[in-house]
Image (cartoon, rainbow, N blue to C red):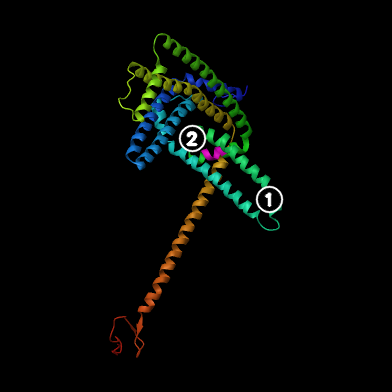
């Protein structure tokens, strides 16, 4: 039986993805992350009421909180897959100091899409040349179709699902980018197959969770009505009261005990939705970690990392030279603009031709007077 250094078996080893629900650290981290996200959302709402700028900053902060919580849970599951478990505080600390790497990889993905798009636009512009344009388009169209399709497939099936596990493994932005490029070139098909299997597993688990929770939910609601707890009726009464109050009907609406049960009903429903989402989400995150570890087994990333580093250094050198040329041209333009002024200020004696200042009345050499 083929296994890699982390004990991840091919394809059917993805069934281990469901083991994430038995990792109490990941469950606890998910709960803590959910609470932090909820508080951040409330804070963003309060800031948005005070100022639009503060609200925008709150949205950005909430996005960072979401990424941090997602990374903390992912780091815990990655270490479990690597058989190197860590504590919850260490996972959150590592997540905080690696969020910028996720953002950097996202920026690299954007640059990749932008580069392919610009290349496609340039080729299509060339296809508008008179005479040979239609012939060039006949060749360029299928080539661009394959290129753009491969780029989209690489992003959807490799970059988006596997970028985070690569960062959680401890790689930098450049190392993560190199790994993604090598995986796209060498193991794209196997990654797609594994992710399809993982998606089916998550879908089946989500269906099981839905059946369990919905059956229990409906039974509990029925029993609640049987003993006289009308939570749904209280909810409808609360909504009716809010509508009447919004329309300006005086007197207000008081549902008494029914409204309190309506609030409990809303809270319990939210808790159940969160519980129902945890199992599929943890399974998916754990599955992407397993797929990543299985995919990178036996691959050599050194050459790809060196190529990326070389290209980045070349890009920096070109940018630095362009900046120096621009500064030199600006200095030349400034000097050229100042020279006519200096020339206009230069005077010479009409008698001895000695240089004179602009405000001199007498020549300093021969003493001749000038008007």
**Residue 88 seen from this side:** yes
Distance from Cα at disc 2 to Cα at disc 1: 40 Å
The picture quadrant where one finds residue 51 is: top left
Residue 125 is one of the magenta-drawn residues? no
Please tell me the numbered disc located at residue 167: 2
Circle 1 packing at 10 Å, graded few (<14), some (14-19), many (20+), is some
Please tell me the numbered disc located at residue 137: 1
Which of the two labelled residues, at mark 2 and mark 1, occupies the earlier sequence position? 1
**Residue drawn at 54 percent across, 48 percent down:** 311
Q: Which residues are magenta?
A: 176-180
**Residue drawn at 65 percent across, 43 percent down:** 145
Quadrant housing the C terminus: bottom left
* Dominant SS in magenta: helix
Residue 127 located left or right of residue 69: right
**x then y, percent, for residue 133:** 68, 55
Quadrant housing the N terminus: top right
Kind of element beneath mark 1: helix
**Residue drawn at 50 percent across, 41 percent down:** 174
Residue 357 located left or right of residue 132: left
Kind of element beneath mark 2: helix
Residue 178 is one of the magenta-drawn residues? yes
Image: 138 above or below 59:
below
**x then y, percent, for residue 318:** 51, 55
Please tell me the numbered disc located at residue 87: none
Discs 2/1, front: 1
């Amino acid at each position: 039986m083929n296994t890699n250094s982390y004990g991840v078996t091919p394809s059917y080893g993805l069934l281990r993805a469901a083991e994430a629900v038995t990792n109490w650290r990941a469950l606890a981290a998910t709960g803590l992350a959910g609470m932090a996200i909820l508080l951040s959302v409330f804070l963003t709402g309060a800031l948005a009421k005070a100022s639009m700028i503060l609200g925008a900053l709150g949205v950005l902060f909430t996005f960072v909180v979401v990424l941090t919580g997602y990374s903390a849970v992912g780091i815990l599951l990655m270490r479990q897959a690597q058989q190197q478990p860590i504590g919850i505080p260490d996972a959150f600390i590592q997540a905080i100091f690696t969020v910028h790497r996720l953002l950097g990889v996202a920026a690299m993905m954007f640059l990749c899409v932008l580069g392919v798009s610009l290349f496609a636009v340039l080729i299509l512009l060339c296809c508008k040349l008179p005479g040979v344009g239609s012939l060039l388009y006949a060749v360029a169209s299928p080539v661009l179709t394959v290129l753009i399709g491969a780029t989209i497939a690489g992003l959807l099936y490799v970059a988006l699902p596997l970028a985070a596990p690569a960062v959680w493994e401890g790689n930098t932005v450049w190392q993560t980018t190199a790994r993604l490029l090598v995986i796209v070139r060498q193991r794209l098909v196997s990654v797609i197959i594994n992710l399809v299997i993982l998606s089916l597993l998550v879908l089946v688990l989500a269906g099981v969770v839905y059946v369990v929770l919905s059956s229990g939910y409906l039974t509990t609601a029925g029993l609640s009505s049987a003993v006289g707890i009308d939570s749904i009726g209280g909810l409808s009464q609360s909504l009716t009261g809010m509508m009447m109050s919004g329309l300006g009907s005086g007197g207000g609406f008081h549902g008494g005990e029914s409204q309190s049960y309506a609030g409990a009903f809303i809270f319990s429903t939210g808790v159940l939705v969160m519980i129902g989402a945890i199992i599929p989400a943890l399974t998916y995150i754990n599955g992407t970690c397993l797929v990543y570890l299985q995919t990178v087994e036996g691959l050599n990333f050194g050459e790809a990392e060196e190529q990326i580093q070389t290209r980045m250094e070349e890009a920096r050198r070109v940018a630095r030279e362009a900046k120096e040329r621009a500064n030199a041209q600006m200095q030349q333009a400034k000097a050229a603009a100042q020279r006519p002024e200096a020339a206009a200020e230069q005077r010479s004696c009409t008698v001895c031709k000695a240089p004179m200042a602009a405000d001199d009345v007498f020549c300093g050499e021969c003493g001749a007077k000038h008007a």
